[in-house]
Image (cartoon, coloured by chain):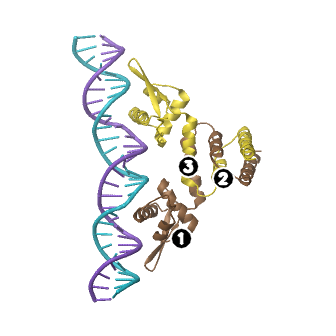
Chain colours: A yellow, B brown, C cyan, D purple
Amino acid sequence: MTKSESPSLSPAEWEVMKVLWESGPAAARDVFAQMPAEKKWAYKTVKTLLSRLVAKEAVEYDQIGNSYLYRAAVDRDAATRREVRGVIERLVTEATSPLIAHFIEEASLSEDEIQELRRRLDQKERGKG
Amino acid sequence: MTKSESPSLSPAEWEVMKVLWESGPAAARDVFAQMPAEKKWAYKTVKTLLSRLVAKEAVEYDQIGNSYLYRAAVDRDAATRREVRGVIERLVTEATSPLIAHFIEEASLSEDEIQELRRRLDQKERGKG
DNA sequence: GACAAACGACTACGCATGTAATCCAATAGG
DNA sequence: CCTATTGGATTACATGCGTAGTCGTTTGTC
């Protein structure tokens, strides 16, 4: 496959990706409109980020007549996994479990989510027989 | 408290911190010597990173006679927590549990570690009654 | 059809980062 | 004692990133 490794995304770029992942294909103006309010970015800033994401091939667009519709070109799960691997590489020398423990500590989790995670741990355990 | 917010560490800086956390106070040359072999950094690069870490107040040094002994000035756990919070902010919009699931998936965990994490989830659950 | 509003393309600019090299003083070896 | 080495301090330089602004074209408005 001629699959080039997707470069990682900067924090600001992640914000834009989150909007695209959650609101589907959208015009630049709409992406701008849907940015979390606390990010007080200019429209131009969002445009720049979109262009950079297109350059990184993390975003594609369809030109419908005159207007452009931007959409994520990478899967959110895949991007998250890449990021997770990066975090693990960066922070961990020996064991990863203390790092995960920190995440559990810092996250706010519903009982259902806790159940779900427990299930995943069980699965992981069975996986190694 | 006049506690100034510690700025976050770059990936390269983390590498240096890991050595300091694991090998205690050390001279620059020893830090260099203990860098993971696959990081083929010049000694000067390590020196630069140490200086930047000192500037960031993440590292301090004692000057014993002529030689300098560098040591971590921030707690590894605290630094990790900050980083974890950053990752959560960056990647998460709604729930954090899918992110944690990715970590569980990507990590290699021993059965004991899985046990330990399960215990932490239990604790988290009891915490909310 | 002329003019303003929008939008995409290109440019800007300062700080962080990766990755060192140079400069200078102290030290150790001959 | 003079010299080569070594270490800290300072400087370098390309790239990435945050955060836009300018330019030129397309388009909708009267």
Q: Is residue B97 left or right of residue A73?
A: right
Quarter occupied by residue A108: top right
**Which residue is at a point 56% across and 37% down the rendered structure image?**
A78
Check whether the beta carbons of the residues at disc 1 and disc 3 lie within 8 A of each other.
Answer: no
What is the chain identity of the residue bearing mark 1?
B
Q: CA distance from mark 1 to mark 3?
A: 25 Å
The spot of residue A33 in percent (x, y) is 47, 29
What is the chain identity of the residue bearing mark 3?
A
Measured along the vertical axis of the image, is residue C30 above or below residue B7?
below
Q: Is residue B96 left or right of residue D22?
A: right
Q: Amino acid at mark 3?
A: Val
Query: Within 10 angstroms of label 2, few (less than 14), some, or many (20 or more) residues?
Result: many
Query: Within 10 angstroms of label 3, few (less than 14), some, or many (20 or more) residues?
Result: some
| Disc 2 element | helix
Q: Is residue C12 left or right of residue B92?
A: left
Q: For residue B52, which numbered disc appears in the image?
A: none
Q: Amino acid at mark 2?
A: Ser
The spot of residue A85 in percent (x, y) is 57, 46
Q: Are marks 1 and 3 on the same chain?
A: no
Using the image as rendered, state which of residue A16 and residue B104 is in the foreground.
B104
Using the image as rendered, state which of residue A26 and residue B31 is in the foreground.
B31
Q: Earlier in the sequence, mark 3 or mark 2?
A: 3
What is the chain identity of the residue bearing mark 2?
A
Q: For residue B25, which numbered disc appears in the image?
A: 1
Find disc 3 in the rendering and name its residue. A87
Q: Amino acid at mark 1?
A: Pro
| Disc 1 element | loop
Find disc 2 in the rendering and name its residue. A97
Q: Are marks 1 and 2 on the same chain?
A: no
